[in-house]
Image: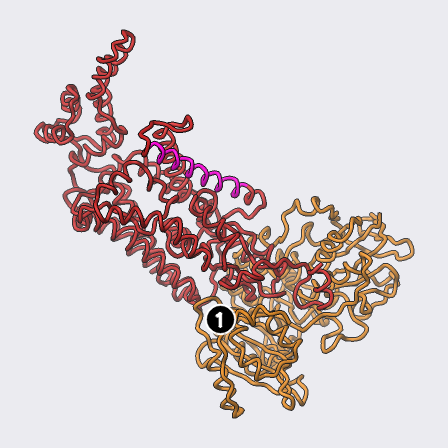
Amino acid sequence: MEHIVIIGNGISGVTAARHIRKNSDKKITIVSAETKYFFSRTALMYIYMGHMKFEHTQPYENWFWEKNNIHLKEGFVAAVNTEKNQLEFTNGETLSYDKLIIATGSKPNKFGWPGQDLSGVMGMYHKQDLDNLEKYAPDNETCKRAVIVGGGLIGIELAEMLRSRKIPVTFLVREDSFWNGVLPAQESEMINKHIKEHHIDLRLSTNLKEIKADENGQVKSIIIEETGEEIPCNVVGLTAGVTPNIDFLKTSGIETDKGVKVNRFLETNIKNIYAIGDCAEQHEAIGRRRNIEAVWYTGRMMGETLAQTICGNKTAYKPGHWFNSAKFLDIEYQTYGWVFSERNKKENEAYFQWKHPKENKCITISFDKNSKLFLGINTFGIRMRHEIFDNWLTQKKSIEHVLEHLLDANFDPEFYKLHEKEIVTKFNKENNTNIQLKKKSWKRIFSKA
Amino acid sequence: MKAIKYTGLVIFLIGLAIFTGSIFTGSFNLTSAELDEFIKEKKYKNEYIKEELTEAVVTSKKINIFEFSTLVRNAFEEANKPYYNLIDKYNKEKKWDKKGAQYQYIINGKPHTLSYTLAKKAGSGFVKENVGLLWFLTFGLAIIGALLFMLPNLILLGKPGIKNDHIYHNSATNRGFIAWLVLIYLVVFYLVLYFYPDYIVNWTFILDPISNALNGGAASQWFVYGFLYCVVMLTMAVRMYIKYRHNKYQIIRTTSVLFFQIVFAFLIPEIMSSLNMPGYDFKNAFPLDYDFFFEWNLKSLTESGGIGIFILVWGIVLTLIIVPVMVYFFGKRWYCSWVCGCGGLAETLGDPYRQHSDKSLNAWKLERWLIHAVLVFSLVMTIITLYCYFSGAQSFLGINSQWIKDTYSFLIGAWFAGVIGTGFYPIFGNRVWCRFGCPLAAYLGLVQRFKSRFRITTNGGQCISCGNCSTYCEMGIDVRAYAQKGENIIRSSCVGCGVCSAVCPRGVLKLENGPEDGRINPTEILLGNDVDLMDLVNEK
């Protein structure tokens, strides 16, 4: 029986394993050095904050794996021997495979800062990072201040985590406004304000110069590049993005750059070896996506796709319309289609924006200013239906159509105050149009594209 | 702010301590005149009871309620004994007439209930004489304390939003020793309420004036329970309003359960009693209202004229038509988390414990066996009862009507719904009864599962499997298992509390009523991936 070995038990590897199991009776082994059982990485923050226990982050009960005949192997892969089709573990063990799937995810970026490997310096990606944080920042007595370096999605989550234990946080962000390489200015500014409301010391346009140690090799303070200011702290969180976790492949002959190079079929240069998820790097970007997509959803999609190929139905990775979501402290964010920041948008892309006068709610719709084609939407504090926007993008609807039917797309809980009317009114005023908001229609919502 | 909070906690605990301690106070004894009046009132034919009770409790000595209970129960037993001896004797001698003649002298009733009735007359002491003060020191302090404890959260919890920080770090909400203490207190409370009402007769004194004002009579232990129930729900609803102040669904739902408890379950029945009508909770549907078809209730309704007949018809229409039709349009949530009293307590007092429901597959299996077994039990009991009511027989299909009613009342009505259902909140979660035991929930669930417009819609491919939804589902539904497959949640047990949707950090879940078509949507490949692949795999 063909033996499929998957390195990494994150969402990509586990999705691949589940789908291979559904479609075949191949022998499947998932290898992990992090934890025996699959857990949801995105939920690590909630454990520290006391919303959940670790067991709650495990989507499948422990019996699931044996019942589905998926072997779990705990161990750290030191090298892949592609000649012998064999994994070599750090403890000397080996494991043979017929097909190998590399799904080892990412590790936090370190840019060569002095002191970046001191104790008390950590990322927030692995289960071990959480254990570390619990060790160095159990409370605000042990950790009198924490400094977070890097203003992205993980950075703001780490800040929220530390604030839940009343630990003072200084948040160093390289950009002059939070995540404004991705978010339009309106939204980025709203998040800046919200961060400060949570009593987080947000430092924009600020870089880390070095991390200083005390006599025990423990973090004592950090120095800011621009001002030379020294900020005493006990914990430093490095959240300046992630990079593929593939050091163990150096000697394997598998082609890598930043990540494991793969073609559209997620195949590496070596037959029977595939890579999916955060660690996979496309030779050429798909549409306007990045070559490396370190996103939960894309990891899952690659897993779904590769399982088809492994089971004999060779399938290219052809993701549909872009979508994503996040939560910035109390503000939920969803995006469908492409909305680029002012910095990255093309000349033909125009914005229509609306912002609630008091509450933390706003939207940006991106559209083609010539054809009025709807390109994408960012919503903050308003939930929207994925399926509806996916249909609209497929059907190449105009921004007028989207606004006219915006009530169909609203996904907020029942009884929530709706703002669609205000949104459409604002558009009409700005564009001299007369779009009439249509009542929500179940028929339209459930009609397939 | 923290100082206010902890002062509140101390005041609450003082109130609770006085409330609990008041049980042990006072003296219970009677004058012979009072005893004569009692026996006359009760029309006892027993020749020994007067002597026995006189010996036991007609004294000027101070007797506390526990000694009183023992003495009175012994007195009743001793007074009955000679008649039982005669019954035995005539039985052996086969003198059936004489044997039968003895039964009229025997005093029936549960010993603690007999003792309660007498204690209500016999009580005296500080509590009874200072009812207003005691009300303030117990209910008053507890309410003030609880509010002081909860109101600062408006500021302490920070900006509106999901506030579940430290739930698993806190002894009270993480099955720590505080949780166990609360469990023990609640379990003991229910045991005393159901089986030893005489021990808490002092509590009834505190509420006599309120009871008098509402229904013209003295408070019973059930009045105490009903009043306490409303007070607890009202106070804990304040906590809900603060915690979920960003979420309008939760605010409206909480207001709804509160309204139905206070007006429908408490005020209307009390006022009806004061007007000499049968006190009836118009929202309490059979088979949750399991004694609706018991002989005594049918008798009372049929003898109460127009209103009785109205109630009888309403009760039947409620169960057979209103309940299923409403479930079709709105899901069982319209009842379980918007109207029901048990649900109301679970959603207010029980909210801090919602995360303790067991999400394992085994628990789900147990749930389905148990809750449907209780439904069958309640229906069998009702069929037997009705058959016996109309035919005048004692039993049907070899099952004694009185026996099955007593068994159901004891096992399901008292133990399952009360002692376990509420007592176990702090450890097993707030919906143990609703999930594993409630026959009405089972009935509503069947309708919801097979014929309803209600569903929890999963938002395409947005789920990140974080597990907040499953963790905070009070019914133990593994919501994530559906959400991460992009599949709508259609489960008979879902009471539509809306908390999964509230705690979701990615806006994945929405409770809604829509067309039945497309309500159940099993998927393998999630939205966002290759359209052709989705078509291929999902539609094969």
Camera-nearest residue between A75 and B448: B448
Image location of residue B352, percent across then percent down: 43, 53
Q: What residue occupies the far right of the structure in this picture?
A: A83
Image location of residue B312, percent across then percent down: 30, 46
- Residue B299 placement, left or right of B514: left
User: With respect to residue A25, does B243 lie above or below?
Assistant: below
Give the chain of mark 1. Answer: A
Quarter where residue A444 is shown: bottom right
Asked if residue A259 is among those painted magenta in the image, a careful observer would answer: no
Q: Which chain is orange?
A: A
Residue A133 visible in the shown view: no
Q: Which residues are magenta?
A: B366-388
Quarter where residue A389 is shown: bottom right
Q: Main secondary structure of the magenta part?
A: helix
Q: What residue occupies the far left of the structure in this picture?
A: B33
Q: Identify the residue shown where x is 23% and y is 45%.
A: B278
Camera-nearest residue between B4 and B44: B44
- Residue A17 placement, left or right of B52: right
Q: Identify the residue shown where x is 33% and y is 48%.
A: B315
Camera-nearest residue between B84 and B377: B377
Chain B, chosen colour in render: red
Q: Quadrant of the C terminus of chain A?
A: bottom right
Q: What residue occupies the far top of the structure in this picture?
A: B93
Image location of residue A291, percent across then percent down: 76, 73
The kind of residue on which mark 1 rests is His
Image location of residue B346, percent across then percent down: 40, 51
Asked if residue B367 is among those painted magenta in the image, a careful observer would answer: yes
- Residue A174 placement, left or right of B421: right
Q: To which residue does mark 1 refer?
A: A198
